[in-house]
Amino acid sequence: MKMALSPPTLICLIVLAVISPTCFSFQTAQIRISRHTTLFAADDEIMSNVDEYRNGVTEFLSNFMQRTPQELGEDVDPLGDIDFSATKVPKMSLEQLAATLDYELYEKEWFVTGNVNPIYFSDSFQFQDPDVKLSGIEEYARGVQKLFNQATSRAQIISTVVNTTTPNTITVTWRLSGGVNIGPGLTIKPYICYTDFTVDETSGLIVFQEDRFDIPGWDILLSALFPFLSGKVTSPPAPEVAPRIVKMPVQEKKLFGIF
């Protein structure tokens, strides 16, 4: 009798086969892969800030995240310069906020660096994408900073505009590339992401962020594990993004006096 396996189950099995030698090491010893980085994490040794995993593959892969210097007991905080309790920005129009976020994101690429500016985010901020849900802007920032390879990853901002079909929403279109700190490290095939910021009508702060991708999750994972399939079995990489000249809106310069 043949047993049918779902696509997520098949992907889990493929991943397990690819990284099983490393997996064995997780159970027997901690392995230092460089002087500066990280040991691999096993099982429940690393506390997760994720509220909910939205698919089994992501939850499975989370067991193979590399350790951060902080988790190794080193006295270093890559986001130590961010004041997560900073005073929130006064309410502005959606158009002003979109232009301001366009500048900030273009300069800081915080979708991968975690170098967020908390003044735009509500204390009740929540995030979700096809893989995870979590609460809090600091949790989000630390999550992406830990996930992405900071030496190679890019979040190239294509546009940041007021969404004309969804009320109180700003949509960012951007190109993701680089790598993730899973197992020995995986390279990401460049693809396009869409980030929807929901803005509270009263406070003018961002209360919710949802990320969407232009290719399915199985395509992203298979391209990372088997790069030679890109453009053949899986979709080709997203094209390069042309550079833009992005300036902080004049109104915001006068308002904050710090940019």
Image (spheres, rainbow, N blue to C red):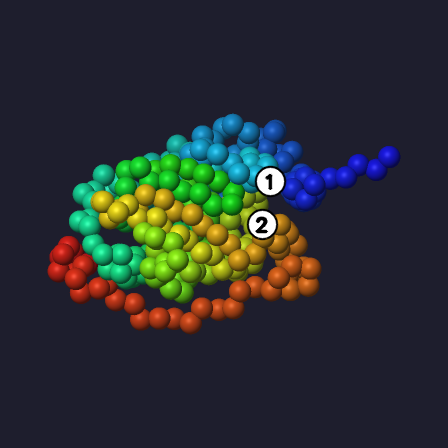
Q: Who is closer to the viewer here, 47 or 126?
A: 126
Q: Residue at x 20, y 54 (%)?
A: 92
Classify mark 1: helix, strand or loop: helix
Q: Who is closer to the viewer here, 236 or 203?
A: 203
Reading the image, the residue beneath label 2 is: 217
Q: Residues within 10 Å of mark 1 (few under 14, many from 20)?
A: many
Q: Who is closer to the viewer here, 57 or 113?
A: 57
Classify mark 2: helix, strand or loop: helix
Reading the image, the residue beneath label 1 is: 57
15 relative position to 73: left or right = right
**Which badge, 2 or 1, comes first in the chain's sequence?**
1
The residue type indicated by label 1 comes to Val
Q: Residue at x 62, y 50 (%)?
A: 218
State how far apart marks 2 and 1 are (Cα).
Answer: 9 Å
x, y percent for residue 177: 49, 58
Q: Who is closer to the viewer here, 198 or 67?
A: 198
Q: Where is residue 157, by image quadrant?
A: bottom left
| Relative to 51, residue 247 above or below | below
The residue type indicated by label 2 comes to Gly
Query: The N terminus lies in which quarter of the figure?
Result: top right
Q: Where is residue 118, by image quadrant?
A: top left
Assess whether mark 1 and mark 2 are in contact (beta carbons under 8 angstroms): yes
Q: Residues within 10 Å of mark 2 (few under 14, many from 20)?
A: some
User: Is residue 68 visible in this depiction of the protein?
Assistant: no
Q: Residue at x 56, y 56 (%)?
A: 215
x, y percent for residue 114: 37, 48
Q: Residue at x 54, y 44 (%)?
A: 182
